[in-house]
Image: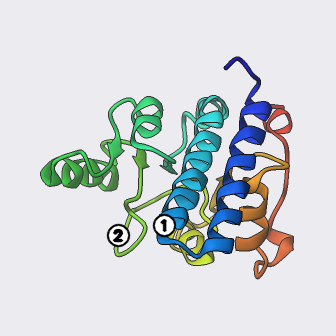
Amino acid sequence: VMCTEQEMYDRMTQKVDWLKDRYMTSRDAFHKIRWLKSANDRKKFLSKCKTKHAKTILDKLKDKRLVCFTGSIEQSEELSKGHSVHSKLHKDTRKQLIQDFNSGKSSKLFATQMLKEGMNLTNIEVGIIVQLDNVERYLIQILGRTLRALAPIQYVLYVKNTQDEKYVENVTINFNKDYIKFVNIEELMI
C-alpha cells in the first residue's frame, strides 16, 4: 500500500483502537495479545520514522560523548556504526563495548533495551532517546545514565500528534518544565 508516514500511522492507529475495543468488549486474552502487539508495531514504526532525524542530530553532535537509546536493534546498528549494545551480541562483546566507552576509547554508545539499570557510564555529555515508553520509570532510568554529567543535554525525539506525544506528556508530567525545551528538528539545525 502506497501511503505517507502519516497515513500509515493513521491506519495503524485505527487497527490498535479497533483491537482495543474488541478486547474491552470481550476481555478475551487473544484480543488483548493482538491489541498489544499492534500497539507495539505502531511504536516500532514511529521509532523507524525518527531514524533520519536521529542521524541529523548525531551529525550535529559528532564531537560529543553520547549515549543513544534506540527503538530497535536494526535502528541501533544503523545509527551506531559498530558501537551498539543489544541482546543479539555476545555478553563479552557487550562488555567490551561498554569498557571501550568508559575508558574513552570510543565516544558513542548505542543501546536497545539495555543500559537502563545498574550501569555506570562515564563522562557522558549528551543523551539521545529515539523511542520512549509510556512508563515514567523507563525515562528516569535512561535519564539517570546522562544526568550524572556536569552540564548534561538530553534529546528526546517524538512525533507530534501521535502516541509519541502522549508518551512525552505522560512521562514528563512531574518534571520541572523550566528544564524542558520543546523544539522542532529544523530549529535544532540552526
- Image point (34%, 48%), residue name: 104
Mark pair 1, 2: CA separation: 8 Å
Q: From the image, tell me which residue sits under label 2.
A: 119
Horizontal side of residue 74 vs 99, given as left or right: right
- Image point (60%, 63%), residue name: 133
Q: Nearer the viewer, residue 124 or 168?
A: 168
Q: Quadrant of residue 2?
A: top right
Amino acid residing under circle 2 = Met
Q: How many marks?
A: 2
Q: Is residue 167 above or below residue 95?
A: below
Residue 174 % position (x, y) = 76, 82
Amino acid residing under circle 1 = Arg
Q: Is residue 144 above or below residue 160?
A: below
- Quarter of the rendering occupied by the N terminus: top right
- Label annotation for residue 79: none
Residue 126 visible to the viewer: no
Residue 136 % position (x, y) = 63, 76
Q: Is residue 96 above or below residue 119?
A: above
Q: Residues within 10 Å of mark 1 (few under 14, many from 20)?
A: many
Q: From the image, tell me which residue sits under label 1.
A: 145
Q: Quadrant of residue 121?
A: bottom left
- Marks 2 and 1: in contact by CB < 8 Å? yes
Q: Quadrant of residue 115?
A: bottom left
Residue furthest bottom as drawn: 174
Horizontal side of residue 92 vs 161, given as left or right: left
Sequence-wise, the earlier of marks 1 and 2 is 2
